[in-house]
Amino acid sequence: MVEQLVKEIGEQGLLARLQRFCPAEIVGDDAAVISYQEPGQSLVVTTDVLVDGVHFSDRTTSPEDAGWRAAAANLSDLAAMGASPLGITVGLGVTGDTTVSWVEQIYQGLSDCVNHYNTDIVGGDVCRSPVNTLAITAFGQVSPQHTLRRSAAQPGEAIVVTGVHGASRSGLELLLNPELGQHLSDTERRELIQAHQRPKPRLDVLPILWKVIEFQPSISPAGMDSSDGLADAVLQICRASGVGAELDYSSLPFPPALKQLVSSQTALEWVLYGGEDFELVLCLPPLLAEALVAQLGGASAIVGTITTGTDVRLRDASGVYPDEILSLRRGFQHF
């Protein structure tokens, strides 16, 4: 079967196809009108740009998975602010020789992700581009008392992570080098690959967090997501809050199969700097942190403590690894 190309159906033809992924009562005008569900809410807006060959590749990601990941990245940013989603818009730049089915599959992945979290694609734009690009803007709402900010961490607070780190980086490696990890079970391989192709923004954590702190109105947790790596998240929180941190090596949440895949040193590198795990990193008083971890279960963990000073250190009580000062320069940088 011969694939239709975008240039063959034109802008209006493409828009007609893409509007099928949006609520009919919202799209069709010059802008979307979204009603707030509750009074006393603040609007939260976040935008990510994803470029073919930089953020996604057909070597490792199907169009549907690329769409899912694009939506998940923005929903994770909303979760990092404590916000619930209202909708996303999509700015799509494609070459004229892109197949229509590729674009539809991208939108199917976008739609599958946002629908899973009870929201919608509410509009966007398309244009010709020399490289396929997605610009996603997500809109959310949050009450002022539930807004998470990087700048709220205080010395003595515990650092909570909501799940494992290094899984997405491991899945990427398995996709790029299928000969690796032959000793892993099918389930272990599938879980690592799914962590890369279909990450889950942790919007589910928020109602549990608010329940844990509901009788502590003076508590304002610091937080952000770990899309750029666990070390990056802790460093960014500390920089914004003017504090330091000490992480405990034995408490870091490694994926169970990670140390079977690579050396212990590489595994540590991927946990700290691998990125794209889309977990939340939160700072809370110790007793509340323990209560949150107990409620979340799974691989959530207290991984360290906020300190005075500005250094972020990794310590290993067993003495196997020397103390290490973590650095933003070791994570992914666009430039």
Image (cartoon, grey):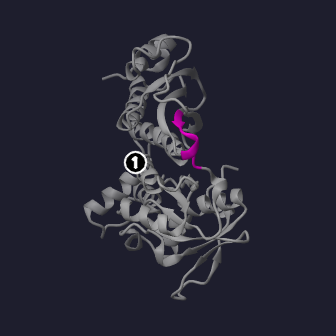
Residue 270 visible in the displayed image: no
Instruction: Tell me which residue sits at (47%, 23%) in the image.
Output: 122
- Name the side, left or right, on which 119 lies relative to 272: left
In the rendered image, which residue does mark 1 sit on? Answer: 204
Foreground pick, 6 / 158: 158
Quick check: 12 above or below 233? above
Magenta segment includes 302: no
Foreground pick, 146 / 183: 146
Which image quadrant: the N terminus? top left
Residue 77, quarter of the rendered image = top right
**Number of other residues with Cα within 10 Å of mark 1, as a class: few under 14, some 14 to 19, many 20 or more:** few
Q: Position of residue 304 (x, y in %)?
A: 55, 71
Q: Residue furthest bottom?
A: 319
Residue 198 visible in the displayed image: yes
- Amino acid type shown at disc 1: Asp
- Give the extent of the magenta segment: 139-148
Residue 106, quarter of the rendered image = top left
Magenta segment includes 141: yes
